[in-house]
Amino acid sequence: MKITFAVLLAMSLSLPAFAGFNGPIQTSIALMVGKSMTGVHGQASVAALHFDFSRAFRPHTAVTWGVQPFFIRQPSHFFTRDGSGNENAFALQLTLGLQHQFGSLTAATRPFVEIGSGPLFSNRRVPVTSSKVNFDSYGTVGATFHARNGYAPFAGFRFQHISNAGIVADRNPGYNIGSVVFGIRLVR
């Protein structure tokens, strides 16, 4: 209940702040799946559904904000040498970022780059024995394809880093994750 209230509060406060920007608010939804690099803390698998909104403040550049529910499968021991087995964690992230599209609006394929970051709240510690509050920062490169019937599909590669930014001072490990993103944008 607290997480739902926090998401609704953050979205209701952020929408009026973007009222002075140009153009309509764009909506997109994407599926992101990936794996972390294997290290002493093992390898995590991540899947997320990204609900995103954006509003242009320059002709090809937009501010983005959104919410991502996460599913994380990670080793159940902090050091994989201490045991085996996996556990599941569910998380919710609030994001704020920038996106830049290249090419003309009428191009069949428009490359884009995107950066973003935000807090990640989980029901378990991520990684194990670390923290339930983390930050997920990411960069994405990809392409948006020609819109049909008001919808434009897009795909990309995302590199992201999840860590607690020193909230738990003695345990600040993180996951470096490579993932693919597939989605659709509502074009107005």
Image (cartoon, rainbow, N blue to C red):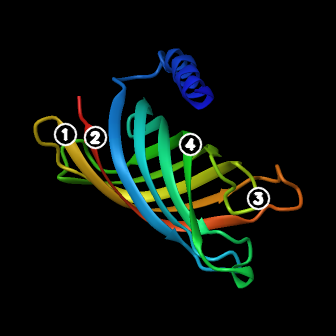
The number of discs equals 4
**Which comes before the other along the chain, label 2 or label 3?**
3
Q: Amino acid at mark 1?
A: Tyr
Question: For the residues carrying marks 3 and 4, which lies nearer the camera in this image?
Answer: 3
Left or right, 51 with reference to 106: right
As measured in the structure, the alpha-carbon distance from the residue carrying label 2 to the one carrying label 4 is: 20 Å
Residue sitting nearer the eye, 115 or 48: 48
Who's the residue at 58% across and 24% down the image?
Answer: 10
Q: Which residue is mark 2?
A: 185
Residue kind at label 2, given as amino acid type: Arg
Q: Residue at x 21, y 44 (%)?
A: 152
| SS label for mark 1 | strand
Local SS, label 4: strand
The image's mark for residue 151 is 1
Number of the label disc, if any, that sits on residue 130: 3
Q: Earlier in the sequence, mark 1 or mark 2?
A: 1
Q: Secondary structure at mark 3?
A: loop
Measured Cα–Cα span from mark 2 to mark 3: 35 Å
Distance between mark 3 and mark 1 Cα atoms:
41 Å
